[in-house]
Image: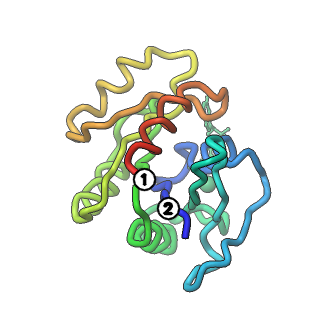
Amino acid sequence: MLPLVALVGRPNVGKSTLFNALTRTRDALVHDAPGVTRDRNYGVCRQDPVRPFVLVDTGGIAGSEEGLAGATARQSRAAAEEADLILFVVDGREGASALDDAVLAWLRKTAKPVYLVVNKTDGIDAQAALGEFARYGIKDMFGVSSAHRQGLDGLLARVLQVL
Ligand code: GDP
Ligand code: MG
């Protein structure tokens, strides 16, 4: 079994864009592992060809706008529970929101490693954007632009270290 990395975060922060950038596909691959449900999107990241891992995207898959209240939250929790590493994705342009705080609150209950991915740092001061999230107390923070493929190499290198 390949290691599994879960993308978790409130809607619209760019999880699916990051998923596509890392898996280099727009097609959802359905992972054939047992217990996998259809409401989560699985793909394989092969950017390092000798160390592939499975990436799971969560939330908004059904076009839901219910935020953390319903299916999105359940999917995210289920993905986090099966993952070896959680990438907590936030929006560097909008800064920390109440929904991000809510995601953080339940991520704190997991013993899994959590990295903070501050997305959408294209065209803004990435350091300032990271600073907005310093109070979350997550040691591993990465400023990226999934849409422009910036910062992904550094993130991947660190991901591969922990898997
Ligand atoms: P999700 O709901 O977390 O999966 O977010 P999406 O991947 O669907 O992206 C939400 C919106 O943010 C879309 O309009 C994306 O084009 C935009 N977006 C995603 N990543 C970036 C980024 O790195 N920079 C900018 N400027 N926009 C982004
Ligand atoms: Mg999405």
Q: Quadrant of residue 86?
A: bottom left
Residue 67 coordinates in the image, percent (x, y): 48, 61
Q: Is 144 left or right of 43, judged from the image as shown?
A: left
Q: Looking at numbered disc 1 in the image, what kind of residue is underneath it?
A: Leu
Q: Residue at x 38, y 71 (%)?
A: 81
Q: Looking at numbered disc 2 in the image, what kind of residue is underneath it?
A: Pro
Tell me, for residue 25, which label it has, or none. Answer: none
Please tell me in which quarter of the rendered image ligand 1 is found: top right
Image vertical order of residue 12 relative to residue 128, above or below: below
Q: Is 47 left or right of 140, judged from the image as shown?
A: right
Image vertical order of residue 124 relative to residue 29, above or below: above
Name the residue beneath numbered marker 1: 163
Answer yes or no: is residue 17 visible.
Answer: no
Quadrant of image for the N terminus: bottom right
Q: Quadrant of residue 126?
A: top left
Residue 90 coordinates in the image, percent (x, y): 44, 41
Whether label 1 touches label 2, CB < 8 Å: yes
Tell me, for residue 3, which label it has, or none. Answer: 2
Q: Residue at x 73, y 65 (%)?
A: 29
The earlier-in-sequence mark between 1 and 2 is 2
Residue 88 coordinates in the image, percent (x, y): 41, 49
Q: Secondary structure at mark 2?
A: loop
**Distance of mark 1 from mark 2, alpha carbons?**
6 Å
* Number of callouts: 2
Residue 121 coordinates in the image, percent (x, y): 51, 24
Q: Residue at x 62, y 74 (%)?
A: 39
User: Local crowd at mark 1 within 10 Å, few (<14), some, or many (≥20)?
Assistant: few
Say whether mark 1 is within 8 Å of ligand 1: no
Q: Secondary structure at mark 1?
A: loop
Q: Quadrant of residue 44?
A: bottom right
Image vertical order of residue 146 relative to residue 127, above or below: below
